Each structure stands twice: as structure tokens, then as C-alpha cells.
Image (cartoon, rainbow, N blue to C red):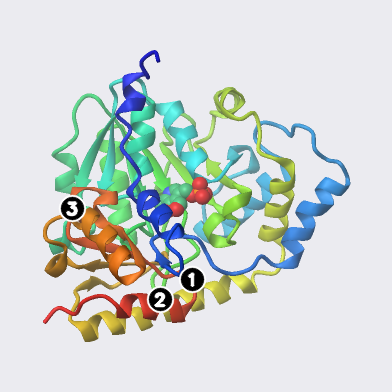
Amino acid sequence: MPELAPHVRDVPVNQIREITEAAWATPGAIVLSIGEPGFALPRHVLDAGIACLDRDETNYTPNAGIPALREAFAARFREQQRVQIGAERVYVVDGAQQGLHFAMSLLLSPGDEILIPNPGYPTFAMTSRLLHAVPVQYPLYPHNDFQPHIEDIEALITPRTKVLILNSPSNPLGAVISEEATRQLMELAVRHDLWIISDECYEAFTFDVPHVSPARFDSEVPGEARVFTSLTLSKTYGLTGLRIGALMCPPGLEQKMNNVMESIVSCVASPSQYAALAALTGPQDYVSQARDHYRSNRDAASALLAEKGIPFLGAQGAFYLWADVSHVSNGDVRTWVRKFLAESGVSFAPGTAFGSIGEGWIRIALCGGQQDLLDGVGRLPAKL
Ligand SMILES: Cc1ncc(COP(=O)(O)O)c(C=O)c1O
């Protein structure tokens, strides 16, 4: 067989998928390793997708998405983040993952450096490598409550640094970046003339703290604005399989965005776009019910971890708990989660899936049923 391109060969394995696929193949396993919201979709969202098919509205849509959906995303962002954004800056994408790939394709040349969080979502590194760029991890340390520190990031900036990725609320940490820290990160980007890609997948789920988008502090002047905001309906509305989200762009890039979109997927499937429109413009009570459920899961699982003496980070958002199992993982948490699945029938994502600082930690997904969650966390060995 001819050789694969080296940048593809070097894309690391996604350890979340590795353990989750092993768990799916284990009869009766409790799967707490993946962020798949457990609730059923409301009827009006399903009906909107089905109605689109019934009308046989199955042709290409504009590259950037149907106008009503772009406007719905823009209206939501204006209202929640007080950002003056029109529909022309909204690109409907195949989920946040495609939004990230889209933004990175637009910004990165081979050899460019992109700053990504450690611990952070695995595809930040995978997608960078696929684009021949160089992911450079900025540390989020336990002693700083896993919050980004400006000096740590600034020390890594070189003439090749092009992009800073932020992710708040964070997967895997459940940490939320404060308004003041967001402003300082924005100032850092301006000082070093960096783009920001802000992954805000979990913006709908914060507990008692606000979600603040860096776009709030961005310039509105074309040529000076620098923030791309990546949003998805996968988490907010549990539409993971419909693959639908939005990338909000700085002004003045419309033609460039169309060109890149055309060369990646042309446009998103029309039934997904109509289902998304119904989700964004219809009743929102199921989002608040989901938030209450995650909060209740967080509180119950946190209490159980505390009872067992297992240290964890108090989650302020998203639907994950980040727990320290170094008392049992023997310096190799990736191997330990496999062993724990085989012996105890529960899967957790190993912290190393998210970077070297995750060694000794696990990510516990809070988005399923509470009984399974407590049963699974209950099987963790206590720290005496
Ligand atoms: C931080 C983060 N970014 C991006 C994604 C990808 O989301 P989507 O399903 O919308 O592609 C996820 C999914 O888990 C995520 O947690």
C-alpha cells in the first residue's frame, strides 16, 4: 500500500472514543465516558425536520445556511452576549467540530502555531495536525483551579503563533472563564495580533455564573475584529446526530467564508437546518430542564466523591466532573480506565485524552440518568 501522508499518520488516537467503544462492546456497562445528552428530542423539533423532507426540500441550500436560521442564531447571540452581530456573519455548519475545522482552515498555514488548552478537547490538536499546523499546549494547572494564566500563555507565543483557542465552559473541566479573565485574554490576543477561536459548545449550561463570550470585547471594525465563535446545537438541544451548529465570524469575511465552506461541505443538510430553526425559535423549557438535571447530577456525584475522599474540581458549567483518581491509577490512567471497565463495568474518559496534565484524572459525564451516574461513581475506590 502507498504511504499515508505523515500529518495524518501523526494525528493522535482519541482516547474518549477508545474507551467508549470498548464500553459499548461490554454488555451491561455503565457508560460515563462520553458527552451524549440523554433526553429525548421534543416533537416540534423532529416534526420540523420531517416536514422539510415531506416538502422534498432536499436541494442545496446557500453555503452559509438558510437565511431564517442564520438570523435565529444571530438574534440569540445578540440577546445573550449583547454583541452587535447580523445574520451575514453567521455560518451554519455541520456541528461545532466542523465549525472548528472551518475556522482553522481559514486561519492556519502549514507550520503555524495554534495555542490549545491542556487539558482540553482532543480535536483541537487533531484538527490542527490535519491542517499541517502545530498545536502548542498552554497549561491549565490544578493549583490555579485549571484556569488559564496570561503569563503561562504569553511565554509560549512565538512569531509563528497565529491562533489562541479558548473553551469556556470547558470540556473536560467544567471550568468557566470569568468576565475579567476573558477581557484579559482578549487584550493578550490584541497585543500579539492573534486570532481567537472561542469554542462555546456548552454556553447554555453554566451554574450560578455567567457565560461571557470574548466576542463581547471584540472590535466591530472589519480588519480589526479577531474572534470566531463556535456554537453547536449538539449539547444545548441534544441534536448530536443532526450535526448542526454555527460559526460566528468577524465582519468582512463573507466571500472568503463562502469559498472555504464550498470546498469543505458546500452546505449543511436541509432537514437538520429546519430542525435547528425549530429548536432555536420554539419553546425553550427543555433546555432549562436539561440544565436542572445536569446541576442535580453534578451535586449528587460531587457529594458521593466527597464522601469517598476523592478530590475533584467543582464544576461551574458544561456537564462533566473532573476527578483525581491518582490514588489508584498508578501513573497510567489510560490503562487504568480499561482495567476499571473490565473489572467494574463502568467507563470514564481518561484525563490523558485531554493532555498530559490530565494524567491521574478522569472525566465523568453528567448528562445521562442519575441512577447510573451514582451507581458508576459509587464503584470508584475510596481514597482513604
Ligand atoms: C469542547 C467541544 N468542542 C466541540 C465539540 C464537537 O461538537 P459537535 O457535536 O457539535 O461537533 C464537542 C463535543 O463534545 C466539545 O465538547
Please tell me how crowded label 1 is: few (under 14), some (14-19), or many (20+) other residues with Cα within 10 Å. Answer: many
Q: Which mark is residue 357?
A: 3
**Circle 3: residue type:** Ile
Question: Could you say which quadrant of the image residue 290 lies in?
Answer: bottom right
Please tell me how crowded label 2 is: few (under 14), some (14-19), or many (20+) other residues with Cα within 10 Å. Answer: many
The residue shown at (40%, 66%) is 32
Q: Gap in Å between the C-alphas at discs 1 and 2?
A: 7 Å
Query: Which residue matches tag 2?
Result: 373
Circle 1 sits in a helix, a strand or a loop, which is it?
A: loop
Q: Gap in Å between the C-alphas at discs 2 and 3?
A: 25 Å
Disc 1 and disc 2 in contact, CB within 8 angstroms: yes
Q: Depth check: 40 or 340 in front?
A: 340
Q: In this view, does 185 lie to the left or right of 101?
A: left
**Upstream in the sequence, badge 1 or badge 3?**
3
Q: In this view, does 231 lie to the left or right of 154?
A: right
Q: Can residue 311 be seen in this view?
A: yes
Q: Position of residue 100 (x, y in %)?
A: 45, 39
Q: Where is residue 266 in the image (x, y as percent from the top left)?
A: 64, 28
Q: Depth check: 102 or 220 in front?
A: 102
**Upstream in the sequence, badge 2 or badge 3?**
3
Question: Could you say which quadrant of the image residue 159 lies in?
Answer: top left
**Upstream in the sequence, badge 1 or badge 2?**
1
Query: Which residue matches tag 1?
Result: 368
The residue shown at (70%, 69%) is 283
Q: In this view, does 254 lie above or below 288?
A: above
Circle 3 sits in a helix, a strand or a loop, which is it?
A: helix
